[in-house]
Image (cartoon, rainbow, N blue to C red):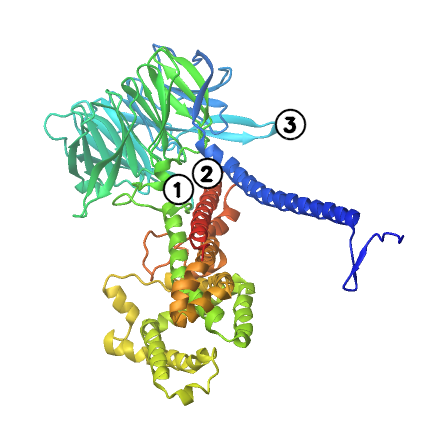
Amino acid sequence: MSEISPSRRHGGSLLPNTEQRKRLRKLRMLKDRLSRYGVTAAGMAVVGALALIFIYLFTEVAPLLRSSSVTVTGAYASPVSTPADPAEHLVLERYEEIVASFSRSGEVAFFRVDDGQVLSRHSVPSAADAGFSTLAAGQSHEGLVVYGYDNGAIGIVQPEYQLSYPNDQRLITPTLNYPLGEQTWLLDEAEQPLQALAIQNTPAGIQVAAATADGRLLLNIFERRENLFSGTVQIIQQRYTLPSLPGEAQPVHLLVDKSGHHLVVADDRAHLHYYAIDTPAAAHLGMSIPTDRGQTTALKFLVGNSSFVLGTDTGSVSQWFILRNADNHHELLSVRDFNSVPGAVTELTPEYMRKGFLAADDQGHVGLYYATSSNNLGVTRLQQEPVSQLAISPINGRLVALNQQQQLTRADVWNQHPEISFRSLWQEVWYEGRAEPDYIWQSSSASDEFEPKMSLVPLTVGTLKAAFFAMLFALPLGVMGAIYTAYFMTPKLRGVVKPSIEIMEALPTVILGFLAGLWLAPFLESHLPAVFSILLLMPLLMLAVGWSWSRLPEVLRGKVPEGWEAAILVIPILLTGWFCVALSPHVEVWFFDGSMRQWFTNKGITYDQRNALVVGIAMGFAVIPTIFSIAEDAVFNVPRHLTQGSLALGATRWQTVVGVVLPTASPGIFSAIMMGFGRAVGETMIVLMATGNSPVVNFNIFEGMRTLSANIAVELPETAIDSTHFRVLFLAALVLLAMTFIVNTLAESIRQRLRARYSNL
């Protein structure tokens, strides 16, 4: 009896026995399991990485979504004012430690916010026989305060703070400055009591507007002249009388802007009046308009003096612009209303460096608002008594409120990003100085009073515009080239063309952007007719060459091997391109008066040298390899039995392409298109260097754009960390990520549907 062999010989090779097969099966199952887990882990890692990117971006954006808040931190009786001698104005300095209180008696006292400790007291210039009648303050950051008296005189003061660091401890020493000297100045030669005042430091000098008890409007300009050699200072006063208000209306509130050109008057009949005072001697009443919101109780300019806010006895709060109309005259226009406070508005306090402001009412409420974004940030009840005075620090972190009983309340404010809202990001906003609402991105300026404009609409439109024109250029070339290369081209020629196009993807986009900005853009500007000629003549040339080739005798056509026909087009294409470029100057002379660009301008079409046409061509070259490579693989991998069966049934090669190849390869072609679109959406360097980076909202092919990615690359290195601008740039990155995620998700869904539909072929 022979011994059983552990393995059998078959065809000269050893076959595994049962035990060996079990071990091999276990090993194969282990490998399959490891592969499955490895692929799953890798996929989950990719998803996790994307999730972490999203979470990081969202954490940077989240503070923009946080609501503003006002938290009361203490209350005590004012140490420097009483109900018999109330404070008429409060100022809180930038370190939020010291309050300046301007009392009706003419005393200016400085005390600490936290404990009420009085630091110093000063006196406002006044005459011995004059009584207080009114008070007004200029721009917050300049600190000018004018006292008006019942003899028609005024006194002007300005708080100042000296900073020192004895023993490495910050010491703030408050003092009082007298811009016009320590004396009063007679404003009204009739010596009537002053009922309302406005003060502003203008290029012409300190301007003071006043309303007297008998209803007259006065304008005084104080010009300070200093002798260059002696150092003596001379104050020149100029007095002007303005036209009276119409009817029997009496002025109640006055505003003078920092340019010294505009005077706004609110009367006791719920009307606003605009005076043009750019030429004081010829000042005139420009317009009168009802407020339609009740009697005006508070009126203040916002920072920059281009717009003002108005509060009424009904609690209404609104913003108004001083605009130049079609007749080149200035007029007052109400642009937005805010949520009302519960009671009558008693005080409006603008922020120092932003377009925000606070409104207080006669029921102890304080409301926070931001003008540009139309943000109603909330209303908080600080006291039970009417709020008579309100001050906020220059850094907007603390406020103090004083009621009629001279009880002072201090509160901490969190209001870091009031300029951002859904409206300011995605809707039209009416900005100061603009004729109408618009979408604008302009994040910085040379002026400290600049109003940031952070609409994401121009950037999103610019991103889609750049991608659209790039796809318009790359899509037909990439897909058609892929179909021809994969199905019609000879393998030898395909082995040269496919790697040559794919290697283009390794070309740095900064090189493409450099060439597009410095060579292509000027070239296209100088040869605009050539662009349109090529677009028109090149397809006609290809059709003509193809038709001519089909009419040649079979003997001649047979000399060109099958799959090499594309080589026939090379020389005609080059000659056509050269012909269009050479003819371009003559076409401009014949049809466009010597300059096609100027012809466009005369027709109202804007032409920028770096525009969407340049970006479309340059970015198209960057996108073509992606589309071509994926689409070519999809077409080439169509099963041969499908195409051979179609040809065997009598279909031509083009009928086979249209009826069999394209439907079968459609999921891959669609993936190629979406990959190319995603590549175009995320492109940075080409659009950064070739677009002009102008954030406009249009699809004009001859104008530039600014994309989300390019904007982030340009502005993120220059912005302050944790600022509103910084976080909005992260929001732009989040929008870009969400946009590509949504597009790719939809693309994958459509691809799967196409795959399921044509999988039975």
Q: Which residue is mark 3?
A: 167
Q: Which residue is mark 1?
A: 452
Label 1 residue SS: loop
- Using the image as rendered, state which of residue 442 and residue 641 is in the foreground: 641
Q: Which residue is mark 2?
A: 724
x and y, in percent, of residue 343 in the image = 28, 17
Distance of label 1 from label 3 (alpha carbons):
40 Å
Q: Mark 1 or 3 closer to N-term? A: 3
Distance of label 2 from label 1 (alpha carbons):
10 Å
- Viewer can see residue 518: no
Image quadrant where residue 259 sits? top left
Q: Is residue 434 left or right of residue 283?
A: right
Residue at horizontal 39 percent and vertical 16 percent from the top:
382
Label 2 residue SS: helix
Residue at horizontal 30 percent and vertical 25 percent from the top:
339
- Using the image as rendered, state which of residue 428 and residue 209 is in the foreground: 428
x and y, in percent, of residue 480 in the image = 42, 67
- Viewer can see residue 84: yes
Q: Mark 3 or 2 closer to N-term? A: 3
x and y, in percent, of residue 760 in the image = 45, 55
Q: Nearer the viewer, mark 3 or mark 2?
A: 2
- Discs 2, 1 touching: Cβ within 8 Å: yes
Label 3 residue SS: helix
Q: Is residue 527 above or below residue 408?
A: below
Q: Amino acid at mark 2?
A: Thr
Which class describes the residues within 10 Å of circle 1: few (<14), some (14-19), or many (20+)?
A: many
Distance of label 3 from label 2 (alpha carbons):
36 Å
Q: Amino acid at mark 1?
A: Pro
Which class describes the residues within 10 Å of circle 3: few (<14), some (14-19), or many (20+)?
A: few
- Look at the image and tell me in which quarter the C terminus lies: bottom left
- Using the image as rendered, state which of residue 748 and residue 192 is in the foreground: 748
Q: Is residue 750 left or right of residue 266?
A: right
